[in-house]
Amino acid sequence: MAALEPLRRYSLVVMDSAGVLRAVLLPHQSTLGAQLQCVHAAAQLGRVRITLGAVGAGALQVGRVLAEELGYGGAAPATSVPTGLLPLVVQSAALPSVTLNSMLVPVDAGYSLLCLLPASSEVRAALVKESAEGQLIEELPEGLPVQLLQAIPGEPLQLSLQPVLEGVPVAYRTTVTTVLPREGGVLQLGAAQWSVRGAADSVYLLVLAGTAQQPELFWAAAPRLWSGELVAQRRFLNASDVPAIEILVDTLVAGERREQPLISGLQRGQSTPFQTISMEYRFGLRIRSAGDGTLLARLDNVLLPLGRRYSLIFVGSRAAGYSMVVHQEL
């Protein structure tokens, strides 16, 4: 039996998923801003992680975890969040790390509940605001998860990715993860702009390359769902100003250091298919020009934990120098 405090609001969430009845009583948190609390009411999902993506107007607010290892019948602590459209990503807590759903959640000041709903196959969610009484729960539409890497050397650039980011500074080699509406959005840098649209069953990596005066946008897509608890997957992308590169694995054999070819002739703006790695080990890479073999950059002591996907993105210019960005995919 729960004791209720006088003059305090509560929400009683009753769920019956897969024939398993659960109930949780949640006291509302008093706040001047917005509070969001996540509740897991979908038994078929298993444990999940819920993260808040990047948002902001004028200043970038990076994402953070709202719920970790949240299981059926559980509720994460209420968290202070910005008001407005919030990009949320739901992922499996168990390996492999898989994006189950993404959504834009309209949050007002006050207390709100985000409920994961039971469904036959897809992951569904609904937002219940504190002011809601006697209303049917409406499912939130699925969004489009995107990852944006700012790969133009120099000072931070003012970028917009409407409708979630508006004129925010993003530094070189910084990756921003957020969610767009299902119909897509618009990426803008100065006078240049690109329409960002995609399929519901994929996640997208956008790489902003070139120069601030002549920017270019490179794309790489990946299936949203994949399997591989005991493997990792990696791919490479050339977002530098080098027309084509060679990627070699640095090895030590019988005390002698050698370079074994891995990727040949990776053209500027192109990405490789994902490669499967079945063992967790440390390795080194050497990146050379495909034209004359000039050593452009090296990456040492790289470890890619299993159960996840990675993009290794070669960035930079002759004037600013070159490097490799290791990005963990959604």
Image (spheres, rainbow, N blue to C red):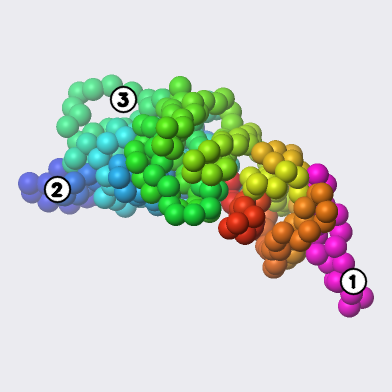
Does label 2 or label 3 sit earlier along the sequence? 2
- In the image, 33 versus 217, the foreground residue is 217
Q: Start and end of the magenta stretch?
A: 246-265
Q: Is residue 137 above or below residue 100?
A: above
SS class, disc 1: strand
At a point 83% along the width and 54% down the height, the residue shown is 292
- In the image, 3 versus 122, the foreground residue is 122
- Say which amino acid is labelled 3: Ile
Rendering quarter of residue 109: top left
Task: Name the residue beneath numbered marker 1.
Answer: 253
Q: Mark 3 Cα within 10 Å, few/some/many (few <14, many 20+)?
A: few
Q: CA distance from mark 3 to mark 1?
A: 63 Å
Asked whether residue 255 is drawn in magenta, I would say yes
Residue 120: percent from left, percent from top: 52, 25
Question: Is any part of residue 149 visible from this angle?
Answer: no
At a point 35% along the width and 49% down the height, the residue shown is 61
